[in-house]
Amino acid sequence: MLPTPTDEERRLAALVRAHDRWRGREVFNLLPSENAVSPTARRYLASDLAGRYTLPVPTEMEGETLDNSYTGTRYTDQIESLANASAARLFHARFATTRPLSGHIAALSALAPLLPRGSRILAIPPSEGGYDGYAPGFVPSLLDYTVRPLPANGPGHRVEAAQAVETIRRERPNAVVLGQSFFLFPYPLREIAEAAHAVDALVLYDGSHVLGLIAGGEFQDPLREGADVLFGSTHKSFPGPQGGLLVTDREDLFDALDPALVWRVFDNAHWNRIAGLAQTLLELERCGKEYASTVVANSQALGRALSDRGLPLIAEAEGFSRSHQLHLDRPRLRAETGLGGGAFARRLERQRLLIDLVGRIGTAEATRLGLTPADMPRLADLIVRGGVEGARVGSEVLAWRKQFRSLRFA
Ligand SMILES: Cc1ncc(COP(=O)(O)O)c(C=O)c1O
């Protein structure tokens, strides 16, 4: 007898179908933390790899040396080599690991093996656009670090070279952790790295938000400009499955770091994710340059078009952005329209336009759909009419969205 699905199972199936239809076909996703995964990578995510283990770590057992705890891994191990080799080529790095399960885990993967308990780190505070994970009470308290602020206090949360160098000389940290969740402009990295290395501090670059841009030669080239390690999420501007990666040119650091990850930061590395990530890396080797330059051109064009229509944005004088993000000027939005950033985003959500509740707008997924700078005035029009004027633009958005049926750069 065939087993009959329960009501809950049917409800679950309906919810997943509804989600896929809504998020995959009926909205424009302008969340800068997300992206669209290529069809081939999605196939690999759903492959048999999703349930498999491999742990190629030598283990002693009753006088026998085992090279893996599992059998059946002949293809998995080759898939990992392929992913790591592609990551190394794409980021022009000598060493790469695609095992970290997310951007946060990639941060732990760099910090825990390289900086002992009691270390001092500099990181940008969340109030100045930094990642919450580096604030006191989160990663620093987990690893028993002291964290001191690296200022990013101008409009657009920019790190200024002279102020950063002065802070590094004064604080003499063991590591400078760069990277922001609100990330519009590249760092003066050569000056920061020179000052950090002069006090024997490592420079760890959290590229979670801008990894896809770096992969395509945009934004900045952290390892060439002096960062010791680059790591980050593989699913924000980088258009892969949710996960993380880490690259470095320094053999001494990789040798200290790579063998320390298993059992310290994670155990199984989720091989379906790594196969999907390998596919995305290979796709970016083919067309990452065009993808990344179009993402940045789109964010600058959208910034101009929104500003021309009266939406207040940060950093107009600097061209709005060098990344996939734009930032709403929330105080001005409230003063001029009476709307908070959250209320503005909820209005847009009802009209099938997704931005985040904290005031960021992103162009990565729209670029994957095939939108170009020529489309940005129309998109800006819909955002201002739907978000500021409260107009019902949802059906117009839906009709336009339906014209984009496949992904570019995939
Ligand atoms: C700068 C930065 N680092 C790390 C993370 C965590 O990434 P994940 O969600 O992949 O763990 C984020 C998340 O937004 C981030 O903005």
Image (tube, rainbow, N blue to C red):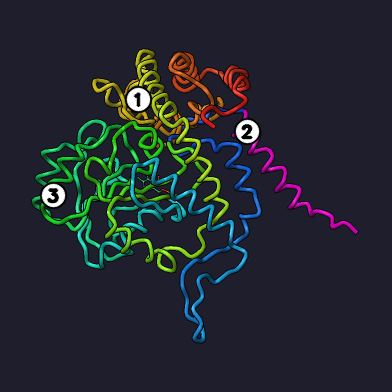
**Identity, as a three-letter code, of the amino acid under mark 3:** Ile
Q: Is residue 347 visible?
A: no
Is label 3 in contact with label 1 (beta carbons under 8 Å)? no
**Of callouts 2 and 1, the N-terminal one:** 2
Tag of residue 168: 3
**Identity, as a three-letter code, of the amino acid under mark 2:** Trp
SS at mark 3 in the image: helix
Mark 2 vs mark 1, foreground winner is 2
Q: Which residue is mark 1?
A: 333
Q: Residue at x 23, y 35 (%)?
A: 158
**Of callouts 3 and 2, the N-terminal one:** 2
Residue 282 relative to residue 50: left or right: left
Q: Which residue is mark 2?
A: 22
- Vertical position of residue 155 compared to residue 8: above or below: above
Give residue 293's position: percent from left, percent from top: 39, 25
**Identity, as a three-letter code, of the amino acid under mark 1:** Leu
Ligand 1 contact, mark 3 (Cβ < 8 Å): no
Stretch of the chain drawn in magenta: 1-25
Is label 2 in contact with label 1 (beta carbons under 8 Å)? no
